[in-house]
Image: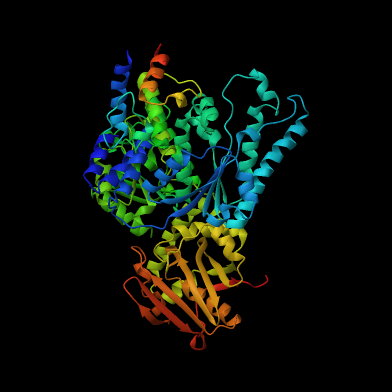
Amino acid sequence: MNQTEVIAKLQMIFDDLFLEPVHLTPDISAKDVPEWDSLTHISLLLAVEKAFAIRFRVGEVENARNVGEFADLILKRLE
Amino acid sequence: MNGTEIKTLLLSGDSQFWDRLAEATREASGFEQLFLLSSLRKKAHARSLPRPGVVQDKIRLALLGGYSLYPLRELVEHICETEGFPCELWLGDFDNYIAEITDPGSGLYTFAPQVALLLPSEHRCRYPGKLTDPRALQQAEAGRVVDSILELVRTLHEKTRAEIIVTNFRLPARHDLGAYRSRTLGSDWSFRKWVNLELGLSAPPYLHICDLEFLAHRHGGLRAHDARGWFESKQPCSPELLVEVAREVAHLIGSLRRAPKKVLVLDLDNTLWGGVVADDGVEGIEIGDTSPRGEAFKAFQKYIVSLKDRGTLLAVCSKNDEAKAKEVFAKHPEMVLRLDDFVSFQANWEPKSENLRKMAGELNLGLDSLAFVDDNPAEIEIVRQFAPEVATILLGPDPSEYVTQLEDCRLFEPHAITSEDVERTANYHSESRRKALFASVTDMGAYLRSLEMEASIGEFAPMDVRRLAQLINKSNQFNLTTRRRTEADLLALMSDPDYIGFSARLKDRFGDHGLISIVIARKTGDTIGIDTWLMSCRVLKRQVEDEVLNELARLAKERGCVRITGVYLRTAKNEMVRDFYENMGFTLTAEDENSREFELALEKFETLPTRIKITRRAYEPN
């Protein structure tokens, strides 16, 4: 899997979670999406862990600054 | 759950959204599912999607504790709202609950909660000494932890009169200490068990335990913990258990104002026994210890008897030939349930919804006091459609799961078991003997005299609070104002000198009816205003209301009052008392569609003669 494929899979999770369609790009981040508040963020992390069958390590998610970095983190945990 | 479907309803502005949302919320198991539903709910509010039904006052709910209360607040708010009792929330800061409760100037008290949820910190529930310390020392420390929680709860309650929910403590789920863990009270395992037990057993009436130990046990100990969630965002437990905690909190809040079901109505064939008695004959049905299926049905009957023993009434509603159906109870040696366990027995070929209506009428209860159990989906459906107030339980295909289905239905949970609950079936049986006597006596006066009634009237006492709150919250028909009150409300009212509150108990030659009538009134100047007057319908036409008015007039005169005022507030269920005050000699002073106001001048009032002997009066030394 590469970053693009991870983002494509993330797109499906976002489509489930968000009411207004969000088009994911590597540069997009929570501050660009009004619906992406801390509440949605918690749901998002749980959904991602389930969909990719991974578990993030303590404290590492907050270092990802945008969707691209988040996708890279997912790739790292998939290794 | 279909999130997409609900989303579509929201986007198209369809108000069916709310019903589907409530349904999906009930079914949702996972945290993300529930979160998604909660965000849909908030978006619906943001779009002002109209919601059919009555707008209710929000319950003021405070959340405080040794954890981050976010996202728990989200879940609690969501479930409470979809279950029909929306809450307005106040949130304490992370681990600041001791200060928030002890400081009289804290925002908590400005908010004035009606219900408070406290999650004391697990990290303070730990024995600080050595595992090998003397047991007495460890026990004393556990007692200290319990006392400190009870002290906080008491302070909070005294300042706010709120009902309080406290979570107790999870037990560890790791092997640490091995078998030694249960040989000392110093281990977290033993210490927390002890604290949890003491806390529950010492809880005052206004304290309701949200049993985290039980919830974690039910959910699975390993899945109850989430160390990462604690380090990252100070969560009290795993997200999945948090959902269970939120559901339990909502259930506790709901049950403060909702009474448990009074009657368990049972189908017969393939519910109480295997097979169809009309086809298989009394000898042919499956019940008893000779086969695994028979044993399962017998266990189900035993469980039903245990429900009866703690105060639930039992009834039968079956499509059957009555004589044939009754023969099973009378003749089959393996039956646990017997005919005299039931307060009503409807075996005929009428629709079950009709039979349930008839039954409710006979028992003087509302349809919403009944819960109906059947193995046949078609029968459940007809009841859902034509008697929707009745709670229904559709039994699954396997009788070995019948008991667990009832155990998990949450319809018969006592707030507290009183001795009167236990005597209830006996009471209903003497009621039918009383009716038989009534049928044989034509002269009403002679009938009432023959009952040899005795009533005892007493001012509200703390010991009675539980039973008073029970009656106030379940009484619908003979209830002039239908104002509900919690135990905490009642305790507050008892300490207010302007309030008069008394209750009456009645017994007769057939049995003790227990507490059957309640009055709350308030003195303003030279007027006594009746706030609440209610009576159990079991004692209708027994002159209890006459004696209650006599008592009220006596108390009013003693307090120098010249008039009594009363109001009738119309509900869907209290039509029977619409003209009550007029019939009692009051004069109508104002009236609109939903309320009628009355007044009684005391100088014209003469004590009403009755056949009841009064053995005690309120506010009098005995």
Q: Nearer the viewer, residue B91 or B130?
A: B91
* Quadrant position of residue B578: bottom left
**In this picture, is B116 found above or below B514?**
above
Q: Nearer the viewer, residue B211 or B305?
A: B211
Colour scheme of this structure image? rainbow
**In this picture, is B122 found above or below B433?**
above
Q: Quarter holding the N terminus of chain B?
A: top left
Residue at 56 percent across and 73 percent down: it is: B613
Residue at 71 percent across and 40 percent down: it is: B144
Measured from the top left, where is residue B579 in percent x and y? 36, 75
**In this picture, is A74 found above or below B431?**
above
Q: Nearer the viewer, residue B187 or B59?
A: B59
Measured from the top left, where is residue B12 in percent x and y? 21, 44
**Number of marks:** 0
Measured from the top left, where is residue B430 in percent x and y? 46, 59
In the picture as drawn, the residue positioned furthest to the front comes out as A27
* Quadrant position of residue A45: top left
In the picture as drawn, the residue positioned furthest to the top comes out as A79
Measured from the top left, where is residue B38 in percent x and y? 37, 41
Q: Nearer the viewer, residue B319 or B99?
A: B99
Left/right of residue B255 with respect to residue B33 in the rendered view? right
Residue B273 in view: no
**In this picture, is B107 found above or below B236?**
below
Residue B203 in view: yes
Left/right of residue A63 with respect to residue A1 in the rendered view? right
Q: Quarter holding the C terminus of chain B?
A: bottom right
In the picture as drawn, the residue positioned furthest to the bottom comes out as B603
